[in-house]
Image: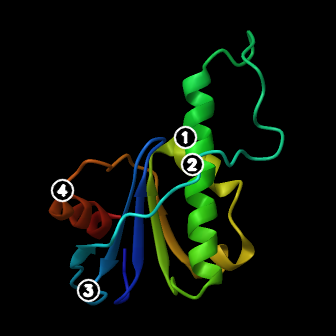
């Protein structure tokens, strides 16, 4: 995957978010960790929060979905504020699916790629390698 300089890479799962910026160029990705951002995990996609029932027995899954939507909200806000000009999202498959439900049109416009892998907790070189292989 080609990552222009200053592309923001968001690496997320249902509990954690790490943001990186490409300080290299498109051919030589060099990620630098960005300051962590506060995620509002109370953000639930419309109609997504239901009381526990046989159809949805897992409260922890609702918490993860809320966090995923909170990450999308945070990224939407940063895009709308002009802080993110190009973006790649790396997330566990379920997290990525939840996040997509909340993408703002402006986020979709700056999104240059998605990688459906759980790379939270991985080292920067491992994340760089996965992005290069994508």
Lower sequence index among marks 3 and 2: 3
Disc 4 to disc 2, C-alpha distance? 21 Å
Mark 3, residue position: 23
Lower sequence index among marks 4 and 2: 2
Please report contact status of discs 4 and 1: CB closer than 8 Å, yes or no: no
Front-most of 120 and 94?
Answer: 120
Lower sequence index among marks 1 and 2: 2
Lower sequence index among marks 3 and 4: 3
Disc 3 to disc 1, C-alpha distance? 29 Å
Front-most of 73 and 106?
Answer: 73
Disc 3 to disc 4, C-alpha distance? 16 Å
**Label 3 crowd bin: few (<14), some (14–19), many (20+), radius 10 Å:** some
Kindly report which numbered mark, 1 or 2, lies closer to the viewer in this rendering: 2
Above or below, 124 relative to 82: above
Mark 2, residue position: 68
Disc 4 to disc 1, C-alpha distance? 22 Å
Mark 4, residue position: 123
**Label 1 crowd bin: few (<14), some (14–19), many (20+), radius 10 Å:** some
Q: How many marks?
A: 4
Lower sequence index among marks 3 and 1: 3
Q: Residue 58 carries which label?
A: none
> Circle 2 — which element?
helix
**Label 4 crowd bin: few (<14), some (14–19), many (20+), radius 10 Å:** few
Kindly report which numbered mark, 4 or 1, lies closer to the viewer in this rendering: 4
Disc 3 to disc 2, C-alpha distance? 26 Å
Q: Quadrant of the N terminus?
A: bottom left
Please report contact status of discs 3 and 4: CB closer than 8 Å, yes or no: no
Mark 1, residue position: 94
Please report contact status of discs 3 and 1: CB closer than 8 Å, yes or no: no
Name, please, the residue furthest toward the top: 54
> Circle 3 — which element?
loop
Asked whether, in this view, residue 79 is left or right of residue 89, the answer is right
């Amino acid at each position: 995957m080609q990552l222009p300089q200053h592309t923001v890479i968001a690496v997320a799962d249902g509990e954690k978010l790490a943001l990186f910026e490409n300080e290299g160029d498109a051919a030589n990705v060099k990620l630098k960790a960005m300051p962590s951002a506060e995620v509002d995990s109370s953000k639930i996609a419309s109609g997504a929060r239901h009381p526990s029932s046989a159809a949805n027995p897992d409260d922890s899954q609702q918490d993860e979905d809320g966090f995923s939507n909170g990450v999308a909200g945070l990224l939407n806000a940063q895009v709308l504020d002009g802080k993110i000009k190009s973006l790649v999202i790396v997330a566990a498959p379920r997290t990525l699916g939840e996040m997509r439900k909340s993408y703002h049109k402006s986020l979709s416009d700056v999104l240059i790629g998605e990688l459906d892998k759980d790379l939270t907790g991985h080292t920067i070189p491992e994340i760089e390698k996965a992005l290069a292989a994508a």
